[in-house]
Amino acid sequence: MKYVECFMLATVSLGLSLHASATPTEDEIRQLGTTLTPIGAEMAGNAAGTIPRWDGGLCVPPAGYSPKRGEAGGGPWVDPFAGEKPVVSITPANLAQYADKLDEGTKTLFKLYPETFHVNVYPTHRTACYPQWVYDNTIKNVRNPKLVGKAPGLINAHAQIPFPIPKNGYEAMWNQSLRVDTPYLRGDQENWLVDASGNVTLTSTNRIEQSKPYWDNTLTSVPDNEPHWTLVSTTIAPAASAGVKQLRYNFLDTEKQDPMAWSYVPGQRRVRLAPEFKYDTVSTSSGGVLLFDEISGFDGKMDKFDFVLKGKREMYVPANDYAFNSAPGEVVNTPRHANPDYLRFELRRVWEVEATLKPGERHVQKTKVFYLDEDSWAVMVYNAFDQSGKIQKVTFFPGFQEYDKPQYRAAPNILYDFTKRVYTNNTRMGADKSTGFYRVAQYPKTFFSAGSLAGTGVR
């Protein structure tokens, strides 16, 4: 198809002109909602029949769904595919047969842990479903969004997937950063660390409160000079860290406004601007493994790396992982790697974006590779390579369709650090004491301010 040929053209960002967005042609736009889904995925299945046709996704909660927050939604979620069995289990014995559909990080896990690691592949279900207004906005306003500056930033976009027909890696990554979300949310999440000896530590339980006016369809745009995403993270446990808070802002036009962050520690009783909360600074709440620019796959400005759209491919990636997100921590956090019997992989079409460190820039990683789900624009798998080109990390994002909203949630992640031989299990939203994200009323503007951070952080 002609649009596939267009998608495969990768650009190298050597200057401002190459960052500029190329508006889709009228012929391409007409494919949205016909041969392409409203947000840009191929509507048809694959020739082999192993990827089905998208039929609208999973938009209605299945029988038995009873969230802790009632009509507000959230966890626990009912697994609509609980009775399914794997169509294949990939082990070291048959790895060569399936290696072309696996990323480098997953293949490294097979090399390191051949006796215990395996990948269970289940039937593919294209569950991603969103409110009709998301589809309408994306198609109606598809000509508007533009990239600006060297970062690059984004303008003229609101309540839509900005680039359903991406022309370069920057556009694809903006789709990832602005994947569909409920504008005002609250929820509790757990973060675990499993060290090289198999010791399991609950590093933190956090209450997350966030505002995403970009996805508020009652607005016509994000107000000038205001962030499109704000978040307050409050540590609930362990007791020694209870009351520690982080406040973060991300902006659309990153050429004009850098991301901002603040921290509050009850013992110090003061709010501190935290300009270091970006790029390759290590997040302490992850047990010293996660970098700030690895949050949710990628976070922050795209100014240190060249992002190249490599094309689309079929891969085995985590998807519809209801079991993983609802299982107790002691069940999934097994030594060396997460319990593979609780992870569901599916064959998906994914966009591959490769980010290479620009000459003269400094970062602990030389290359980042992202595999983005065509149906949701969420990162499914992320690989990181060090300055020598050696695989450093792999992160799985075992997400699932939140049919209560409806939207696809890909925040849960399992990050393997091959250098330290440790892994983290972060942001699970449906397990143990977690509530999952649930809707709340719009927050007062003062809630996401540095002054409010101190007042609400006292314990």
Image: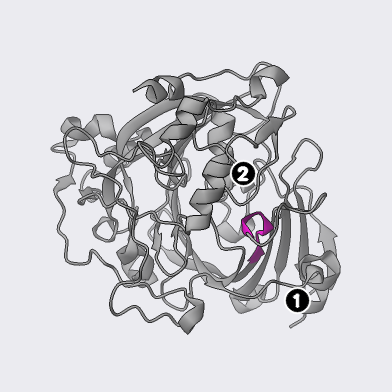
Q: In this view, does 313 lie above or below 340?
A: above
Q: Do the residues labelled 1 and 2 touch (CB within 8 Å)?
A: no
Q: Is residue 104 above or below residue 273?
A: above
Q: What residue type is labelled 1?
A: Gly
Question: What number is the disc on residue 234?
Answer: none
Which segment is the magenta one?
Answer: 210-216
Residue wearing tag 1:
457
The residues bearing labels 1 and 2 have C-alpha atoms spaced at a distance of 25 Å
| Residue at figure coordinates x 47%, y 18% from the top left | 9
- Would residue 446 be found to the left or right of residue 294 on screen? right
Residue wearing tag 2:
293
Q: Where is residue 431 in the image (x, y as percent from the top left)?
A: 41, 72
Q: Image quarter for residue 341?
A: bottom left
Q: In this view, does 306 lie above or below 448?
A: above
Quadrant that contains the N terminus: top left
- Would residue 191 be found to the left or right of residue 414 on screen? right
Q: Which amino acid does label 2 sit on?
A: Asp
Q: Position of residue 86 (x, y in %)?
A: 16, 53
Task: Identify the secondary structure beneath mark 2.
Answer: helix
Q: Is residue 348 above or below residue 65?
A: above
| Residue at figure coordinates x 23%, y 35% from the top left | 46
